[in-house]
Image (tube, rainbow, N blue to C red):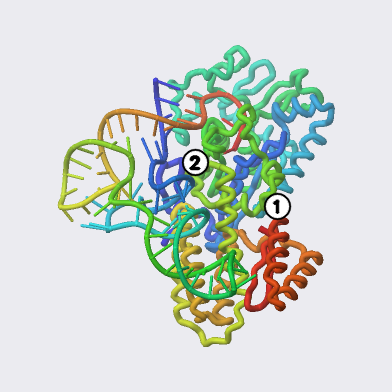
Amino acid sequence: MALKFYNTLTKRLEEFYTINPGEVRMYTCGPTVYDYAHIGNFRTYIFEDLLRRYLKYKGFRVVQVMNITDVDDKTIRRSREEGVSLKDYTSRYTEAFFEDIDTLRIERAEFYPHATEHIGDMVALIQKLIKNGYAYEVQGSWYYDVSKFKGYGKLSGVKLDELKPGARVSADEYTKEEVHDFALWKAYTPDDGGVFWETPLGKGRPGWHIECSAMSMRYLGNHFDIHTGGVDNIFPHHENEIAQSEAATGEKFVNFWLHSAYLIVEGEKMSKSKGNFYTLRDILKRGYDPVVVRYLLLSSHYRQQLNFTFSGLDAAKSSLFRIWDFIDNLGRIELDLPHNPEVDTIIETASSGFTTSLDDDLNISGALGALFNLVRRINRLISSGSLGRDDARLVLEKLSDFNRVLDIFPRENAPIEDWILEMIKKRDKARKNRDWETADRIRDELQKKGIMLQDTPKGTVWKKR
RNA sequence: GGCGGCAUAGCCAAGUGGUAAGGCGGCGGUCUGCAAAACCGCUAUUCACCGGUUCAAAUCCGGUUGCCGCCUCCA
């Protein structure tokens, strides 16, 4: 079955194709490093991680670019408030961003260009737009003349004559000629402090949209395969990127536009004023394993609004334990049995269910369903004693294969703790003496500390729950 | 006002014409010294509501209701 994606540009499910055979070039809108990223941001990054990993799973070579926006109104304002340089300020949150994506097992992109390191590319792009007649200057700032670009609105469906000024912006704040025109280059103002570049366009700093056009084309060429982001980026950001890029090059910019839906928290839009605003760090402080957060964000379809709740996190944790326990149990099998052909059937069914689902616009629910069906069917064989050691290894290999896409195991390695082993030894002695009272007391004590004991034929094992 | 999305069990969530995947939770049972894990059985005659098309609809069409998002820098 062919790989298909829902393309925001055509508003249809489309069979995926690449410009260069076997290679996918993709641009994923990255963070503005003015604060810690929140779980809504990570919902999008996890979707992009799934996309990237699945493309690789399908055998494509992937070149992914994710921008780091390290100059904008917010970064400038906050760094000035703190009295530190823009660079010092943004590098703190850039580092935090990379720590967080590592924590969530988000695979690294090939390139993470910083906006401030590509001012020259942006200036050159703006000059091209000036030359092609798409830009005009007002009081040292340069604006894009939206009326000049015929295709404006093709991504978002926005029609220019229907755009009305939003309540959030008072029109007199702007010197541009039309309310829907947008800044390519912003003239220096005293509010910018020490943040400015002296360029042929004048003294100032870039607008927001231009960086993504400049950096994506710099690393991926004028025309590339996939561009992604959150739905909120469709308009105006991505619409403007298309306008800038295509007006400058005369070529089609991107073939596939993929957008992830919003994340809400406990049924409401996440916002600081509602007190339901969470960074990754806030969640981890509550004692959740990062991979549980990964699983929750991963386990529902990217175009489906995701309701993030703490009871959902608990459910995600239980689901993961089903998989982790399954893996542990497979590793303990020592039966020496001939190959059971039913194992092949189970593996093949799961395998094709996994790829058929993901081929269908990354239908992760179907893929996980295939995985859990395998878990249940193999557990059945384990229960009936008809799964041997070699077959168990085959199953583990298939799980590792799936895990190239999912990356949900192994669990963080819990260090072996001597005091726990001591307690287990004491309990074993009690059990041998059939002193169940002591044995159970020890088990309860450990349980209170989050240590779960399991008595298996091979002895007692423990795990953190 | 314009544009777009969504409504499936207690919760999460697939399924877009052929008779409701999967996970969590719950209940009963098997195993176990007791547990845990696992297994077995049960947990939506029904897919927001009302009409229509069809041999057949959660799936298509029309309408109603409810929720949500975007509309100038928020993933």
Q: Which amino acid does label 2 sit on?
A: Gln
Q: Judge left or right: residue A426 versus residue A324.
A: right
Asked which quadrant contains residue A426, the reply is bottom right
The chain containing the residue under callout 1 comes to A
Q: Can residue A430 be seen in this view?
A: yes
Residue at x-position 74% and y-position 48%: A99
Q: Which of A207 and A7 is in front in this view?
A: A7
Residue A297: x percent and y percent?
Answer: 57, 48
Residue under pointer 2: A305
Label number found at residue A102: 1
Label number found at residue A447: none
Q: In this view, does A462 lie above or below A48?
A: below
Residue at x-position 57% and y-position 50%: A296
Residue A61: x percent and y percent?
Answer: 59, 59
Residue A2: x percent and y percent?
Answer: 43, 59
Q: How far apart are marks 1 and 2 (CA)?
A: 24 Å
Q: Judge left or right: residue A32 versus residue B59.
A: right
Q: Which amino acid does label 1 sit on?
A: Asp
